[in-house]
Amino acid sequence: MPLTTDTRNKLMTVSVATLCTALFKRGLRNQFIQDVHPLNAGLPNMVGEAFTLRYIPAREDLNPISVFLDRGHPQRVAVEQCPSGAVLVIDSRKDARAASAGGILVSRLMKRGVAGVVTDGGFRDSPEIARLSMPAYHHRPSAPTNLTLHQAIDINVPIGCGDVAVFPGDVVVGDAEGVIAIPAHMADEVAAEAVEMTAFEDFVTEKVHEGRSILGLYPPTDEQSKVDFVAWRTRHKR
């Protein structure tokens, strides 16, 4: 099911932590991509359907720098074909010793309207990428070219990224804390529930800062907490 504008807008307003809980309620425990971090934590949420690129270990006789002369090279094709509004997710085998991509390729993705880029490896030119307006997530900076360790082999196939299975079309969401992959068929219902959860958590946070105990409030086992939440939603038009 394609990502709708309504669901995209909802996912722009919720945290990855809240989405993790919504997915846990549905039996999915391992959707948070491990050990990836935003280069610019101040950007809005990253939301888009996954378009994938897979690397395997480089074999020296097949991976000289001259491979980039081929316009059909999978890395170059991925950058030029990743759809506007999608997120390019790169399987770098959790190996950040060589870069998954650099500032020029990430800038090209941004200019093409891509919603973001994620790798479980590293980016070179990371200070430059951090200044871009498009979200980017990686494990750590890595200056060497990807060719020294990574061989681009497939685009838009199921991959592993940070110990998470990512399928083309999965809905990928990133915030200042990290990145989660939501199976496409449940994105609408998860987004809707996450908006409701966020409203309640905002209410609870306000009450906690006012000095209220979490007992009976979080979760709302006291009837008064439920009454207060209804009144809070009315007051805040949530």
Image (cartoon, helix red, strand yellow):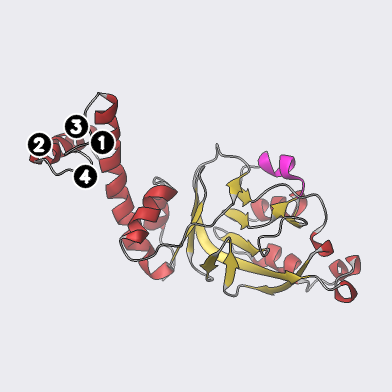
Q: Nearer the viewer, residue 104 or 183?
A: 183
Per the rendered image, the range of residues in magenta is 124-130
Q: Nearer the viewer, mark 3 or mark 4?
A: 4
| Mark 1 / mark 2, whichever is N-terminal | 1
127 within the magenta span: yes
Real-space Cα separation, disc 1 to disc 2, in angstroms: 13 Å
Is disc 1 placed on a helix, strand or loop? helix
Classed neighbour count for the residue bearing mark 2: other residues with Cα under 10 Å, few (<14), some (14–19), many (≥20)? few
The residue under the point 36% across, 60% down is 23
On the rendered image, what quadrant is the N terminus found in? Answer: bottom left
126 or 59, nearer to the observer? 59
Marks 3/1: CA–CA distance: 15 Å
Label 3 Cα neighbours within 10 Å, binned few <14 / some 14-19 / many ≥20: few
Three-letter residue code for mark 3: Arg
Q: Which residue is mark 1?
A: 204
The amino acid type, in three-letter code, at marker 4 is Pro
What secondary structure is found at the residue carrying circle 2?
Answer: helix
Identified by mark 1, the residue type is Val
Q: CA distance from mark 3 to mark 4?
A: 21 Å
Q: Find the residue positioned furthest to the left.
A: 223
Residue 37 visible within the image = yes
Pointers 2 and 4 in contact (CB under 8 A)? no
Q: Which mark is residue 224?
A: 2
According to the picture, the residue beneath numbered tag 4 turns out to be 219
Predominant SS along the magenta part: helix
| Cβ–Cβ under 8 Å for marks 3 and 4 | no
Q: Position of residue 130 (x, y in %)?
A: 67, 41
Single out the mark in the foreground, 1 or 4. 4
Circle on res. 235? 3
Give the image location of residue 61, x and y in percent. Answer: 90, 75
